[in-house]
Every structure is written in C-alpha cells, then in structure tokens.
Image (cartoon, rainbow, N blue to C red):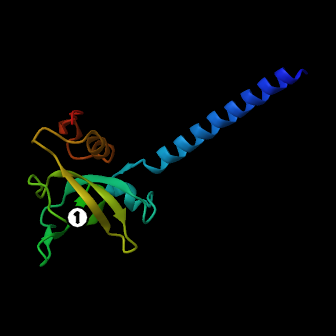
Amino acid sequence: MTPRRKQRLIFVLVLIIGFGAAISLSLFAFQKNLLYFYSPSQIAANEVETGQMFRLGGLVVEGSVVRESDGVTTQFDLTDTAGSITVRYTGLLPDLFREGQGIVAQGKINPQGVFVAQEVLAKHDENYMPPELADALQEVGAKHPESIPRNTGY
C-alpha cells in the first residue's frame, strides 16, 4: 500500500469514527430530554420510577381541590376513571383550571407517592382535550369514550 493510500484510509477511518461519535452523543442528549405521558392507572401499575420527570394527564376529581394557607400551593386528585393520584402544585393555576376538567401536569412522583407538578396545563375551550389524555381515557373505558373530543390542534 502506497503512503498516499494509507493516508487516505486513515483519514476516512477518522472521519467515520468522528461521525459515529457525534451521532451517538446527539442521540444520548435527545434521550435525556424526552418527556413521556402517563395516566393515573399506569402510575398505579408502577410503570413510572420515583423521581423520573414525565407528564400526567387526567380529570380533576370533584371535591378534591384543597388550597393551602400559603395561597399558592394546591393539592388535588387526578383520575382517568380507572385510577387516581394526588397532585401537589405550588404556583398559580391556569384560569381555566376547575374540578371535572381535563388537565396535563408535568413533574415527578415523590417518595410518598404524590405527584409534585412543576407545570399545570388546562384545556383552552370546552371542545379541546389533549390527544394523549383522550386516548388514555378511551383505553381505560371512560363512560362515553366516543364523546371525548380528539382535537389535535394546540
């Protein structure tokens, strides 16, 4: 093998290894930033690890909203009609937040089994429900799953 061919071969090998390393690092960084969606019944089935960041969706249980004396901490139960979980949120809730309404919250489960939300999102009108929440409610057999709107626009 001539020295020129040897030099080209080394260059191509270094280039392939460099591209492979760049793609591996990109995929690793992307994987760490994914947020999965779970329903309360999936959490009851222990499909989520404690301390893992994820999104939780469901309906706010009637009569479960309790506002603490500090004025910004709220605790409520979230259900998908098959399972239920307690959610604790410190901050201002969206104006459209109310009992019986579908919401999506982002946060983690603490060691006591309470979902500590960092963000709470409420639907923007009476015809909207996040597609993940509508699918989760249909999956567990909500009373009238066909009546759940499936608007995919945000």
Quarter of the image with the N terminus in it: top right
Residue drawn where x is 24% and y is 42% of the image: 130
The part of the image, by quadrant, that contains residue 139 is top left
Above or below, 13 against 139 in this view is: above
Q: Is residue 128 left or right of residue 56?
A: left
Q: Depth check: 121 or 127 in front?
A: 121
Q: Is residue 141 left or right of residue 110?
A: left
Picture mark count: 1
Residue drawn where x is 14% and y is 59% of the image: 93
Residue drawn where x is 30% and y is 42% of the image: 132
Q: Residue furthest front?
A: 3
The part of the image, by quadrant, that contains residue 84 is bottom left
Above or below, 78 against 111 in this view is: above
Q: Residues within 10 Å of mark 1 (few under 14, many from 20)?
A: many
Above or below, 79 against 5 in this view is: below
Quarter of the image with the C terminus in it: top left
Q: Amino acid at mark 1?
A: Asp
* Pointer 1 residue: 77
* Residue 127 screen position, x and y as percent: 12, 38
* Residue 6 screen position, x and y as percent: 84, 26
Element assignment for label 1: strand
* Residue 50 screen position, x and y as percent: 43, 66
Q: Depth check: 88 or 28 in front?
A: 28
Q: Residue furthest right?
A: 1
* Residue 17 screen position, x and y as percent: 69, 36
The part of the image, by quadrant, that contains residue 109 is bottom left
Q: Depth check: 14 or 69 in front?
A: 14
Above or below, 63 against 139 in this view is: below
